[in-house]
Amino acid sequence: MDHFLPTTKKEVEALGWSELDVIIISGDAYVDHPSFGPAVIGRWLEKQGLRVAIVPQPNWQDDGRDFAKLGKPRLFFGITAGNMDSMVNHYTATKRLRHDDAYTPGGQHGFRPDYATTVYTKWVKHFFPDTPVVIGGIEASLRRLSHYDYWSDKLKPSILMDCPADLLVYGMGERPMLDLIRIFESDNWRDHLDECSQIAFITNNLQKYCNKDEVLRLHPFEKELSNKRFYGENFVAFETESNKKMQRTIIQPYNKKYLVIKPPYPPATEEEMDSYALFDCMMNAPHPKYAKRGDIPAWEMIKNSITIHRGCFGGCSFCAITAHQGRFISSRSEKSILAEVKDLAQRLYFKGHISDLGAPSANMYRMHGRNDEACQQCSRASCIFPNICKNLIINHKPLIELYKKAAAVNHVKHITIGSGIRYDLLLGDGATDRENGLTAYFEEVVRHHVSGRLKVAPEHTQTKVLNKMRKPGFDRFLIFNRKFQQINRAAGLRQQLVPYFISAHPACTLDDMKALHQATEGQHLHIEQVQDFTPTPMTYSTAMYFLGYDPYTGEKVFSAKSKGEKDKQKGMFF
């Protein structure tokens, strides 16, 4: 690839284009690399033969000229807040304004608005009211349904009720984009929405789009506002449905309108995942216009890493990955990953260290159910909590081979595994261990892929809190820690295990934090960080925080809500 996606009229003209098909507007600076969603979708659309431009971090505080500068696209505008929800990007867990932004040159704060997706869409519709607008990315995806918004302390409707977008794409966007290209090329795209998957929209005519499908109908938003119980019931229904491999269309009434969420695509095949690996179609660098503004921290952190799969079956209560990427794993082929390793090794900035071969969880590569029919009948939130599903293949041998082959590539001196490792997957009995290479994988990582410190996330020590987190008991972590120390001693290494914990999670009291402190003393752990729980849209933990009870059981659940309570819990940790 010899060009960046154009960001200005001058750059569009330099490519010889007289018209654009799609314009993407993003809350992040433009980094043309596979870890940055707006660039990935832009390049994917370009791969389909479309002329695509990107407007990164437009100025929303003046007359809006950035939103109009490239004119009207032939097909649609694509709008995203960027790689993070704009409110998580802006505020800490205690709602204090952050003073930096990892997705902006120089780490500068203030280059995107709160609720960026909605603000950007309103500007675009101001200038181009008749042009379709499609919203996507984390912010739109995790706000597609009614949700508790921590920053306003309100139950909010679907983002589509506040944001004048025409369509919402949730989850990973490559396949939905193929649907949208096809329907926007037709005479009346609204007549073809029933042919699309993994999108959401508002309609007055429910029968037109849903009479052919089996439907999950949720309580109306108005009932949720009148009584939290209805929100709790909706949450359980939605999460249970989203855990399934084959899902139904979801409907939620809003007065006389209806939110329609079409089912997602099945998990991507290996061939599809390889086609989404666009490293050879990208510049793998920030746009040159940022050269004098300083480094982009997120790029500096990720530029030497490679994503090997998508999805996570861990089902942690506080994590929204499953609601976005899905519970089932979609892996790239070894051939595709090694091709990217070789490509990375030739880049001018590469110094020999690959900082990660990973994904949401490092060690779920190629893992799936033995019996797919059983998976299709299952709606468990997690494949490994409260125990590891007997149908789950947990073979780590393909990962060991991948690491060894990647390490053998010319100019690669060292590979570290920066993604979180699910340590509970590595603690099987003797036969399970040998069959799946569990200890062999653990030894490979500790001996060759740790830069002095291995970070893992037990999150807490107290069983009642861990159960609400959908995390394994602390005794499992202690077994893992002992194995880590044994492997270190056998290898003559003095590496540290660095555990991460969460304070103020629902069900966690001050006494529980005292118990955590006591439980970790004397365990030879290098404890340096505890993170305040932040309620983010569409998670089980957030539902408990908002409701004050567990929506599955009705059991009351305490949550520390004031800054003082949160500070005391965090202070107790140290």
Image (cartoon, helix red, strand yellow):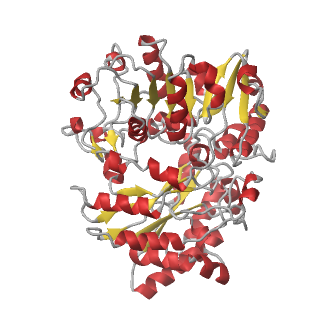
Query: Dividing the picture into quarters, in which one does residue 410 lie?
Result: bottom left
Q: Where in the figure is residue 71, as x and y percent of width and height?
A: 34, 16
Residue at x-position 39% and y-position 63%: 338
- In this view, the residue in front, 369 or 100, is 369
- Quarter of the picture containing the N terminus is top left
Residue 450 position (above or below residue 561): below
> Left of 88 or right of it: where is 268?
right
Q: Is the residue 390 above or below the residue 54 in the image? A: below
Residue shown at the point (45%, 87%) measured from the top left: 490
Most foreground residue, 364 or 18 = 18
Determine whether, in the image, residue 255 is placed left or right of residue 345.
right
- Give residue 336's quadrant in the image: bottom left
Please indicate whether residue 198 sits to the left or right of residue 290 in the image: right
Q: What is the x, y in percent for residue 95?
A: 50, 36
Report the label total.
0
Can residue 471 be spotted in the picture?
yes
Residue 540 lies, in percent from the top left, at: 67, 45
